[in-house]
Every structure is written in structure tokens, then in C-alpha cells.
Amino acid sequence: MIPLLSEFKILQPQSFTSHWIAPSNIAFVKYWGKRENQIPANSSLSMTLKECLTKTKTQFTPSKELRVELLLSGERNDAFSTKMFNYVEKLASYYPVLNQVDIRVETENTFPHGAGIASSASGMAAFALTLTDYLYHLSSRERTKDFFQHASYLARLGSGSACRSLYGGFTGWGTHISNDYAVPIDVHDLFQTLNDSILVISSEEKKVSSSAGHSQMKGHYFAERRFDQANDHFARCISALKTGDIEAVGTILESEALALHAMMLTSPKPFTLFHPNTIKGMNIVWQFRQDTKIPVYFTLDAGPNLHLIYPDAHKKNVLTFINSELNHLCEMVIHDRVGDGPTPC
């Protein structure tokens, strides 16, 4: 338990409304498998995005008991309302004031939900920011540096990868840096303008959730070796990000993406989130890089959609490549880049 929590034990509920925008992130080193209390089984590292965002408005109203209602894009979502209620109810043991509030959450994304572009990360990050905002308001605290650390801690308890969406640029999380919350990572200038063109091969909600996928790592024959691999990649990737070694970062990117999906294919209850066009796209990227020597690399989160990562100096050539050779594989392409982190709105 982090010391920040002790200051919020004795608070009285008040009416309050908070608005925040939080970004999604794309993991360069993947988090897949967790211990108790949302502690990651391996360290992970991600790049915060700029255009893939969740905008959230949360209204807190004094009540005799905890109530939670969540609206996604203007429509009440019972499944998410229940999930959010369960999350806040657990937090109420640390923050008793939450037992006395009616919480109404209105949230919307700028990108497809549930398709493997980390909407749970941006969504939970945005809500954690509004919740932290409420707690700081009740305790008359300023939004100092620890505000985002606190929000990252709360976000992690709802969705592990969400803790990395509380900062701009690049962020690390796990035993090598901190299990409780994410920490910003300084990188070489080359990576401060990195691009991410997302090939949305399928916007359908994935059939196996990330939570269900994480659970498959328990008893997985290759789990411990996978955790060793990820931790090794974490250390090597941070080193390459600091020295500006795009080839080393790109090699780790692709290895991590394939290792993640290999864990799904070899899990106790095997499954795949690949689409046929996912594999076609990977082969086309490999061939393009071999032919042109342009440093464009792919990665995937837990879904079928390819993220193409490349330096800004090669943007014109990569966009031409996408338009001519990859567009036919996709429903849409979202052109994104390194973002600055969440903002109040």
C-alpha cells in the first residue's frame, strides 16, 4: 500500500464533477500474466498515444450508499456499470467516503472499443483521474506531482495497462521500476516524435478478453520463460530507447508482439486473436523493410490490429507504403504518434 492512501481515510462526501481526457498506449514490452492485486508478472514498457483517447465526465453526488452508472457513447452499459461498481466497492475499503456517493460516468472513445487498441487502458485511466480529482477536492489538496502517481496507482487496480496511460512519452511498470504505479522514462530525441499508424484490420470486439487471456498464464507451460524473456527485453529496450537505436527497439517490438500471441496459441485453452489479414500485413511489412531498409516495425496488442511504428523522418514513405500496399487489408487506418499524456477538459 502506498503512503498516499492514508491521507484520504476521513473525508465527507460532496457534490463534484470532474472531466478528464486520457490516452491509450501501445506496449513495446508486453504485460501478460499477473499476480494477486494486479501486480504484473513481468515488467512492461509502453508509448503513450496522442489521438486514441477516452473522454470521461464523472459526477459524484452524496448518497446513502454506493451507486455507479456508466454510459458509453451516450448509452447505458450495464456490464461496464457492474464492473465499475465492483472496482469502486473494493476501493471503498481504503476510501470509506466512496460508500456514500452516487457515481455517474459518461465516457466516449475516439477509436474502436474492445478491438485490441487498449480502450480499457485509456478508459480506466480517465476514470481514475476523475476519482483522484474528487479525492483531492475533498481533502483540499493541490494537483501536485503525486496526483498522477496516485491516479496511476488507482488505475492499475482496475486495469493493469491503464497505469501506463497517466504520463506522456514512454512509461515503464513492473518489478524493474515499480509494481504499484507506472514511471515515466526519458528517451533519445529520435523517439520523441515516433509515429504509430494503426491498421484496424477488424473493429469487432474480440472474442477473448484481455482479463481472460491473462488468466490463461496460470499453469501455462511456458509462463516463467516468457516472464524471463519480457524482463530481458524490458532492460534492453530501455537501453536502446536512451541511445536512439531504432533497429534494436524495432526487433524487440516484433519479438514481443509474436511472443504475446504465441502465449495465446499455446495456453491451456488455446485461442488466437489473429485475423488472416494480420498475418498478410506482417509479411508485407517484413518484405517492405527488407527491400527499402526503411525502419518501420509492427507490434500488436491483444487483438488483430497492427501498429506500425516508425521515425518521423520516414513518414512520407511509410504513408505511401500504407496507402498502396496495406489499405486493402483494413477497415480504417488511424495515424497516431507519441502523446503528451492526459489533460483535464
Image: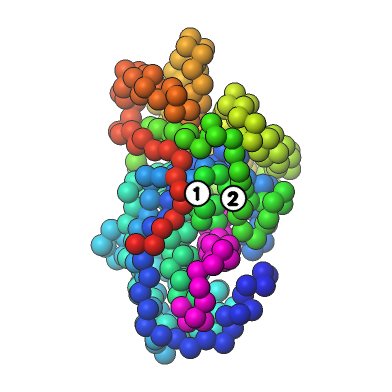
Quarter assignment of residue 221: top right
Question: What residue is at 28 percent from the left and 58 percent from the top?
Answer: 73
Looking at the image, how many numbered discs can be counted on the residues?
A: 2
Q: What amino acid type is highlighted by mark number 2?
A: Pro
For label 2, the SS is strand
- Which residue shows up at 46% across the image and 71% down it? 133
Image x and y of residue 63, in percent:
39, 87
Image quarter of the N terminus? bottom right
Q: Position of residue 313 (x, y in %)?
A: 45, 24
Residue at mark 2 to residue at mark 1: CA–CA distance: 8 Å
- Please say whether residue 232 is visible from this viewpoint: yes
Q: Dominant secondary structure of the magenta stretch? A: helix
Q: Secondary structure at mark 1?
A: loop
Q: Is residue 131 left or right of residue 71?
A: right
On the question of residue 157 being in view, the answer is: no
Mark drawn on residue 334: none
For mark 2, what is the residue?
184
Circle 2: is it few (<14), some (14-19), or many (20+) Cα within 10 Å? Answer: some
Q: Quadrant of the C terminus?
A: bottom left
Q: Residue furthest top?
A: 291
Quick check: 177 left or right of 263?
Answer: right
Q: Residue 168 — which label?
A: 1
Instruction: Name the one closer to the observer, 154 or 306.
Output: 154
Dot 2 and dot 1 residues touching (CB under 8 Å): yes
Residue range (magenta): 137-162
Identified at 39% across, 38% down, the residue is: 336
**Residue 76 on image: x %, y %:** 29, 66
Residue 298 is inside the magenta segment? no
Towards the viewer: 73 or 17: 17
Residue 15 or residue 159, whichever sits in front: 15
Lower position in the chain sequence, tag 2 or tag 1: 1
